[in-house]
Image: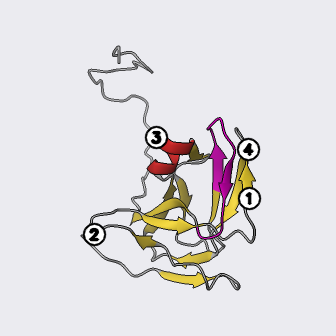
Amino acid sequence: MNTIKVKVMRKQGCEDLPLPQYMSEAASGMDLYAAVNKAIMLQSNEIKLIPTGIHIELPWGYEAQVRPRSGLALKYGLTLVNTPGTIDSDYRGEIGIILCNLGKDPFTVERGMRIAQMVVQPVTRAELIEVGNLEESPRGVGGFGHTGH
């Protein structure tokens, strides 16, 4: 696995929270922690922005993607509205998690709870070239569900 250095800064008052961390040796995502000052109730079908208490400085040419945690999704129906959320290398604001409760029961977000995961990866930029025609392909213009799956 490749390793890059990412600078991280804690928001004042969040020194008690762990920094994002990988929870296993082969994990691709680092867990992010809720930096709420008091417990927040997320009702069924409710969306709230949950702070993480950290700012990061990614190297040029990298992005971070914020994704749901599978255990919270399976057990409670928690997901992220904008998944994956993208953090560009020039963003310096606090990372916030747009958490959504798709479950039928209310869910309480508490300080220090692992609420999402962050994956850092290289960015590839596309150069668009306008043309009059595209090459034919076996699929052609077949859209959603055209293969029967």
Magenta run includes residue 109: yes
Label 4: few (<14), some (14–19) or many (≥20) C-alpha neighbours in 10 Å: some
| Residue positioned 39% across, 18% down in the render | 142
The vertical placement of 112 against 147, above or below, is below
Judged left or right of residue 46, residue 128 is left
Of 105 and 114, the residue lying toward us: 105
Span of residues in magenta: 98-112
Judged left or right of residue 86, residue 24 is left
The residue indicated by pointer 1 is 40
| Residue positioned 41% across, 18% down in the render | 145
Q: Nearer the viewer, mark 2 or mark 4?
A: 4
Contact? badges 3 and 4 (CB < 8 Å): no
First along the sequence among labels 3 and 4: 4
Where is residue 92? Give x, y as percent.
62, 75
Distance of mark 3 from mark 2, alpha carbons? Answer: 44 Å
First along the sequence among labels 2 and 1: 2
Distance of mark 2 from mark 4, alpha carbons? Answer: 35 Å
Q: Nearer the viewer, mark 3 or mark 1?
A: 1
Is label 4 in a helix, a strand or a loop? loop
The residue indicated by pointer 4 is 43
The residue indicated by pointer 3 is 130
Where is residue 32? Give x, y as percent.
53, 67
Distance of mark 2 from mark 1, alpha carbons? Answer: 31 Å
Q: Amino acid at mark 1?
A: Ile
Q: Amino acid at mark 4?
A: Gln
Is label 1 in a helix, a strand or a loop? strand
